[in-house]
Amino acid sequence: MNLSGVYPALTTPFAADGSVSLTDLKYNIERYNSTGLAGYTVLGSTGESVLLSQAEMDGVLATVKETAGQGKRLIAGTGAESTVETIERTKRAAESGYHLALVKTPHYYKPAYKPDVLIAHYRRVADASPIPVLLYSVPIFTGITLEAPEVAVLSEHPNIVGIKESSGHVMRVAEMVAETSSDFQVLTGSAPTLLAGLTVGAKGAILALASGLPEKCVELFELALAGHIEKARTLQTALLKISKVVGSEHAIAGVKFVMDQRGYRGGIPRLPLVPISQAYQQRILESLARVEPIAARA
């Protein structure tokens, strides 16, 4: 399975009463279908998956599957704290028609999660999974980092096909590429280092920013792929600046605000997360204007 391309880390829209708005989610997917996005990643960190009930997660899975355009690859976040629950979620995603499972590291019992424990966890999940598995390292949220040596070991499993590496450290991406075979695909989860990640061998990206600026993220990927490095650098600099503003402590609310400005249905996050302040909104608007005039909405 070729995972080359850009995948948005989809947000989850909420209605005024706080419930998940599948209508708004469907609206967003219908609009994304007309872009060059390679597919969709649901129930990840940006999707506020840890704040959703199982029934809500099932609704999101079904809505995206039903609405996704033909040829779009579908990735479902299925990681949970226990191996058993992770396997159950992964099987549920497979039954829903998803192509890959994105499995974040368990993290609550941090002192216990040494490399050998994580390796055993992922092997059991991959053994039981009906669909290929993508490792997911997102230390900003979990405090657990998958390093190149354990990724290299896990890459030997026939059902573990790649990793979303979201630390933002290009050297870590380079090490993973160097220590795994060409069949193992490294996807970066960092918009500010997208160009650098592609340069050292990443095959694509799963990006929160692509939920609000899908065309620009795809454009950067395609410029890099075509070897138009100077143009790619110029666009990367612009995306870096807005990523720096959006990707602060209110990253999910910031991404949703960008979506609102571009005609998507972002809305507010679910409590205990809170919307961004007016002052912070202004900072995002100023950064967004440098990437693309707000009047020229998608």
Image (cartoon, rainbow, N blue to C red):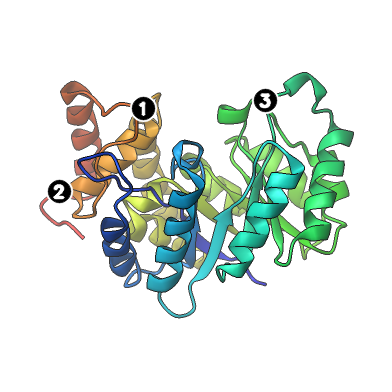
Estimate the spatial distance between the alpha carbons at disc 3 and disc 1, rounded to whole Å: 20 Å
Q: Secondary structure at mark 3?
A: loop
Which residue is farthest top?
111
Estimate the spatial distance between the alpha carbons at disc 3 and disc 2, rounded to whole Å: 41 Å
Which image quarter: residue 214?
bottom left
Residue 182 place in picture, x, y as percent: 78, 63
How many circles with numbers are drawn on the protein?
3
Front residue (pair 51, 114): 51
Q: State the mark number for residue 273.
A: 1
User: Along the polypeptide, which appears first: circle 2 or circle 1?
Assistant: 1
User: Along the polypeptide, which appears first: circle 3 or circle 1?
Assistant: 3
Question: Is the N terminus in the top left, top right, bottom left or bottom right quadrant?
Answer: bottom right
Side of 202 relative to 49 (left or right): right
Residue hosting label 2: 294
Q: What residue is drawn where x is 79% and y is 56%? A: 126
Please, what is the three-letter code of the amino acid marked with disc 1? Leu
Local crowd size for mark 3, using a 10 Å CA cut-off: few (<14), some (14–19), many (≥20)? few
Q: Secondary structure at mark 2?
A: loop
